[in-house]
Image: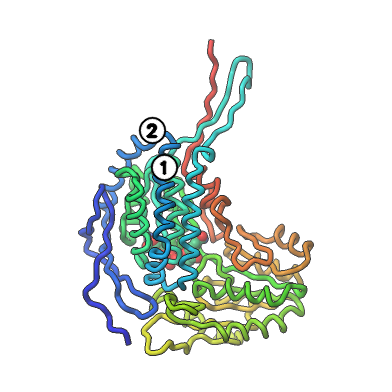
Amino acid sequence: MTPVETEVASVASYIAGEWITPKGAASHPVINPADGSVIASLPYATAADVDRAARIAHQAFLEWRQVPVVDRVQPLYRYKTLLEKHAEEIAGILTRENGKTAGDAIMEVKRAIQMVEVACGMPSLMMGDSLNEVAKGIDCHTIRQPLGVCAGITPFNFPAMVPMWMFPFAIAAGNTFLLKPSEKVPMTPTRTAELLLEAGIPEGVFQLIHGGREVVEALLHHPLIKAISFVGSSPIAKLVYQAGAAAGKRVQALGGAKNHLVVMPDADLPKTVDAILGSAFGAAGERCLAGSVVVPVGEAAEPLLKLLVDKTRALRVGDGSKAGTDMGPVIGPEHRQKILGYIEKGIEEGAVPLCDGRALQIGDSNGSFVGPTIFDQVKPEMKIAREEIFGPVLSVIRAKTLDDAIEIVNASEFGNTTTIYTQSGKAAREYQTRVEVGMVGVNMAVAAPMAFFPFAGWKNSFFGDLHAHGKDAVYFYTEQKVLMTRWF
Ligand code: NAD
């Protein structure tokens, strides 16, 4: 057993131009999920801190919106360089508090940097339309203006990247921003915030408010906050969407997922198995784009499952910071218990475990490990087929035809991502057209749209209109105005 540290540093919030330790009564221990040790303590900010930060952000907005967009993006260019310089360091912090492997962590940091790169294009992205002589002597054009103070609330699984779906776009567009990261992984967003300040973001334009529910509720109700971006589980996404909208705010709330991977009999078997392994067990299944239900069609099932099970058994699970680890721990002991509960439920419901990750023990570690688990003979009505598990548990629902597979996918309450594996363009096209899912891959492991495309699911995976990053982020963080002009 690794001894639990008793003396740890506390993680600060950045409010009103200084790093502070909030005076709230609550705090949260930050743990290294690979060994269970407490690595930091996170004091929670309060509603009063949110109020102070929102007022300062509003004052800063009145000046920041007047800074020409070409000047607003200059700190972001410097930020990109700083993030590149510190990428390995940030990835190391990320692995330590989140558990994902070093390879996954560095990929996440690279994806985060791409968000900054795209936001640097704001001078072009914010341009409006214009048309002269729409009527005799009258010209018409549109402009995009920033909203004011915007806030972001983010989940534990991508602490470097998900906040950057938000603040680089918001800030470049002329808004000011308050970030409330996940309390489970506060150290990564704190380090990236330090670098943003080092890049020269003016005071009040960006503030970091660590906390829990009290902070979120204060953000949702503060009259000076105009827009809320949320990423997390579906129940909280829905709650945030409803409360934010009721308070008159613009809201985008990205939720949970249950993603299906449909395998046709003509799929390239080895490549498909590698893609499914990456999708289901990469980041220990803690991705909103993780495949969690495989749907083999017709005779695809037997050869697919044989190779999939062989390769799954060969995966090396362990401390993500160690070279050669394929899969790290899940986020913490509570979440581990929840995942084990789902595996037990699957067995109780009659699914057949081909790989059972419950008994996995890594040395004498106190880490939150769950071995990769595969269930065959899963029925769509079973709990493991319907609910988001957010761990390394893959269910197999066999389908007779592509039509059956599409029906299974469309019956899900979620619609985040899905992939079809096939060599038939016709089957792929049919699938892409008919599935009720926001992000659709063909022969992909993880069909994650890049920074210049929009990102979001459908149905209970998303509440709102405009998706994350890409042009949608520009539209989300700006209000359009139409100007009509006649000169005598
Ligand atoms: P979560 O919903 O528990 O927490 C997300 C944020 O909401 C955190 O900052 C948390 O502090 C806050 N929060 C939690 N409970 C709250 C409450 N009752 N009231 C107010 N605020 C609350 O999600 P998580 O466990 O951190 O992250 C995993 C979830 O996020 C999964 O469901 C995953 O699918 C989803 N996710 C979705 C996407 C996407 O793009 N759709 C991306 C990443 C993660």
Q: Residue at position x 49%, y 70% from top?
A: 103
Among the two numbered marks 1 and 2 on one chain, the one whose residue lies closer to the N terminus: 2
Pick whichever, 435 or 319, lies toward us: 319
Q: Amino acid at mark 2?
A: Gln
Q: Nearer the viewer, residue 22 or 36?
A: 36
Q: Quadrant of the N terminus?
A: bottom left
Helix, strand or loop status at disc 2: loop
- Decide if ligand 1 comes within 8 Å of the CB at mark 2: no
Residue most extreme to the top: 488
Q: How many badges with numbers are in the image?
A: 2
The location of residue 184, given as percent across then percent down, is: 36, 68
Q: Secondary structure at mark 1?
A: helix
Q: Which residue is mark 2?
A: 66
The location of residue 429, given as percent across then percent down, is 75, 60
Q: Which residue is mark 1?
A: 74
Tag shown at residue 236: none
Relative to residue 276, is residue 90 drawn left or right? left
* Left or right of 368 on screen, residue 286: right
x 29%, y 44%: residue: 203
- Ligand 1 in which quarter: bottom left
Graded by Cα atoms within 10 Å as few (under 14), some (14 to 19) or many (20 or more), the crowding at tag 1 reads: some
Please say if 163 is above or below 59. below
Q: Residue at x 72, y 62 (%)?
A: 431
Indicate the position of residue 105 as horizontal and vertical percent values.
46, 67
Distance from the alpha carbon under mark 1 to that under mark 2: 15 Å
Q: Residues within 10 Å of mark 2 (few under 14, many from 20)?
A: few
Q: Label 1 is placed on what type of residue?
A: Gln
